[in-house]
Image: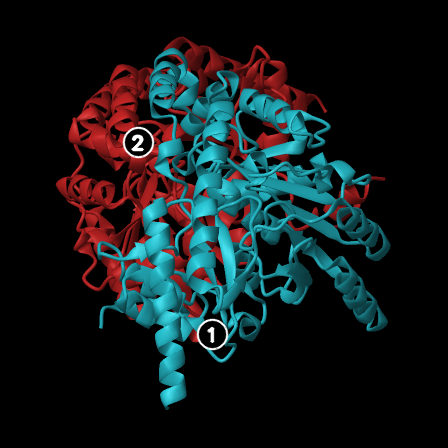
Chain colours: A red, B cyan
């Protein structure tokens, strides 16, 4: 065996590949309708404007746009970001309360790196964002899930859990939430619960991470205040991304938090990648100035609402007798729960692939995978309306066949 | 105090800011000649070609170039990279032996994340690349420095150290080297030493990281084989970057290693930033295809050789009686060692700044900072020839003044 392979083999335990991911990789290039992904529809990319902006930025500011840049992010871009964020009602005290990251994935990673010691308690919604779970697991956090309902995180159950922990002398370090158009469920936390969550943060002294990829293009009018805005004491770390509001290929995310926290994230980031790519920051700055983001948001809202409706209609037509689901008011996904709780959707996936459709088994979104066994996440942002309808039809057929088979055996 | 600040304060020990970095930050915007940085001269950026490429790539391939992309990197870009790397004589078996990273900084970070457990022995050249030291320190590696001379790492001393360690039942996990136009000294390891290093790697069973930002534009004809090419058994992880051969603002690095190692780096990278920004990868792919990198390398070689010569001349004229230095055959830096070993260049820095010149104190490049106390790293890639001459003059004056003061006291 090549020696490099031997070294790699010894480390494989530390970095285990996701079986689901490997399975879904096999579908690439095949004639399979994928409701498994989480990609934006490229129709929303403002290709003409971005092409022109890229050209101009390189020609006119190439000396800077092609050069190394500060770890915190390009200052003029952070100023634009500050205004953009504020204009949506998110409290930002100062430009130095912002750091630019290589996608919001890096934001979560850096937050973990700075704050989580092995064994620290991190509380998340259940189900929650898969990639956040993975980050917290890599830091050996002690994860606790709190169920959600149609009004977001069950903050009453959170309080019970906090009391229970407190009795053992334990407190969480971080509560992680996607309060608005939650991933994967699409629900939004009510303002009452938001306020209660922040009161609990004071009482039990923890940080709150508000992950917010979707609030800028909700499908319905929804009144809510950002956790960051309600936060009196700098406990909230607000995280967002350009991936859904402009283009993922620029790989730009940002964090708003007290500047003392931002300074720590900056130090951690120095070692990770020195700084986020400069050129995309200059492009995004100009895109914000010229209203490209505003334009994209308008398109996104309309397009995704239509697709969401197609998904809900297909579910109603095909799966009313098989499952329940949450009606998302934003985001890219809906979460479907099968009535037959004996079906394990991760075992079902292979059969679904044979019928030409892919989804993500619900397990992956739960701290305790068993709780999500009979659920699946369906994406509606990327596939066409026709693919959504056909995909749901195929899933329904797969579920029905499995039920027949189970009865026969 | 804001609660966020209290949380941050508790974590400050884990992520200590570099005093030097903070000091140099203060110079920004002031009328100070900086020989402290490590920036390429923007004159070498091929602004016209890159602007046109960026425009075309977004217009014609926007669906992909603005979208999420694989963690390993865009496949067609990795194919171009494979050919580019091979064309310079570096052994690459396969496209899957390559991963694209967010600058070579992330490459080093991921290597640390995958392979270094706290207390693992990592051996480096002394002096060595500052940012690599920082990464290894963050992973609590047990660092050991091996001196360099004009022929690169003193592999004979490495062997002595390995024997000494072996007697205690210890072995290094990784030997990190910048074998070609070393940072910060500019020297290149002879082929005999390279072969010996790899023999030792077999004998004492360690991995070798070959960090290579500079080999593509050496100022003099130099015969050498890459460690990666001499490596029979997949022990070498080759790391390089587009920052010096095209533009740092794209933030593109890459690693060549056995695919089992690349697969581990991929898993680690998934959690860190999901993938490297897509658009810069499409731009760099096209730039490789159209010969933009080749053109840039031609310019870089000429421009930096001239500046290096200006630096060496200035040192000869101004500091012959004060210091010795290594003549770099490539790269961005020269390392200067003061004859008066009682001078601490990190204390001297404040006085140098008062005289309007900045450098990086040598300490930062040494495992044992004391060994580098009387040295400094000078950059010649970014300042103009006139600034180089004037900067060296000011440093010489600062050193002379310090010597007079020392005698007086």
Q: Which mark is residue A159?
A: none
Among numbered discs 1 and 2, the one appearing first in the sequence? 2
Q: Which mark is residue A168?
A: 1
User: Residue A163: x, y in percent?
Assistant: 38, 68
Tag 1 subunit: A
User: Residue A299: x, y in percent?
Assistant: 23, 19
**Residue sitting at x 38%, y 19%:** B49
Place residue A389 in its image quadrant.
top left
Residue A336 lies, with reference to residue A199, above or below; the image says: above
Q: Is residue A86 left or right of residue B257?
A: left
Q: Are marks 1 and 2 in contact (CB under 8 Å)?
A: no
Residue A254 lies, with reference to residue B286, above or below; the image says: below
User: Residue A372: x, y in percent?
Assistant: 52, 40
Tag 2 subunit: A
Instruction: Check if mark 1 and mark 2 are on a common chain.
Output: yes
| Residue that mark 2 sits on | A62
Q: Tell me the element at label 1.
A: loop
**Residue sitting at x 41%, y 55%:** A111
Quarter of the image that includes the N terminus of chain B: bottom left
Q: Tell me the element at label 2.
A: helix
Q: CA distance from mark 1 to mark 2?
A: 58 Å
Residue A329 in view (yes/no):
no
User: Residue B80: x, y in percent?
Assistant: 58, 22
């Amino acid at each position: 065996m090549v020696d490099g392979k031997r070294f790699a083999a010894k480390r494989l335990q530390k970095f285990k590949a996701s079986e689901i991911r490997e399975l879904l990789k096999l579908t690439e290039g095949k004639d399979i309708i994928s409701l498994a992904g989480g990609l934006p529809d490229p129709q929303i990319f403002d290709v003409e404007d971005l092409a022109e902006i890229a050209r101009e930025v390189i020609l006119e500011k190439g000396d800077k746009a092609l050069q190394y840049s500060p770890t915190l992010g390009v200052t003029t871009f952070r100023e634009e970001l500050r205004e953009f964020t504020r204009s949506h009602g998110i409290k930002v005290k100062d430009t130095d309360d912002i750091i630019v990251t290589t996608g919001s994935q890096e934001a979560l990673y850096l937050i973990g790196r700075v704050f989580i010691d092995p064994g620290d308690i991190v509380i998340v919604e259940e189900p929650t964002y898969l990639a956040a779970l993975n980050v917290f697991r890599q830091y050996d956090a002690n994860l606790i899930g709190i169920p959600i309902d149609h009004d977001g995180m069950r903050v009453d159950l959170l309080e019970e859990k906090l009391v229970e922990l407190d009795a053992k002398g334990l407190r969480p370090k971080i509560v992680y939430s996607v309060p608005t158009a939650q991933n994967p469920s699409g629900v939004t936390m009510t303002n009452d619960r938001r306020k209660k969550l922040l009161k609990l943060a004071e009482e039990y002294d923890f940080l709150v991470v508000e992950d917010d990829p979707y609030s800028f293009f909700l499908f319905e009018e929804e009144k809510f205040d950002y956790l960051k805005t309600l936060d009196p004491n700098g406990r909230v770390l607000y995280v967002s991304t350009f991936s859904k509001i402009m283009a993922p290929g620029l790989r730009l995310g940002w964090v708003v938090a007290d500047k003392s926290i931002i300074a720590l994230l900056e130090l951690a980031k120095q070692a990770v990648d020195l700084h986020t790519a400069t050129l995309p920051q200059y492009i995004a700055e100009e895109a914000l100035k010229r209203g490209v983001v505003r334009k994209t948001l308008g398109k996104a809202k309309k397009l995704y609402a239509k697709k969401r409706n197609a998904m809900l209609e297909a579910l109603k037509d095909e799966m009313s007798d098989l499952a329940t689901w949450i009606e998302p008011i934003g985001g890219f996904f809906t979460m479907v729960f099968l009535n037959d709780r004996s079906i394990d959707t991760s075992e079902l996936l292979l059969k679904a692939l044979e019928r030409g459709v892919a989804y993500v088994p619900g397990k992956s979104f739960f701290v305790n995978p068993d709780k999500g066994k009979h659920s699946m996440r369906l994406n509606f942002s990327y596939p066409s309306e026709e693919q959504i309808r056909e995909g749901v039809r195929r899933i329904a057929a797969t579920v029905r066949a499995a039920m027949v088979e189970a009865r026969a055996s």
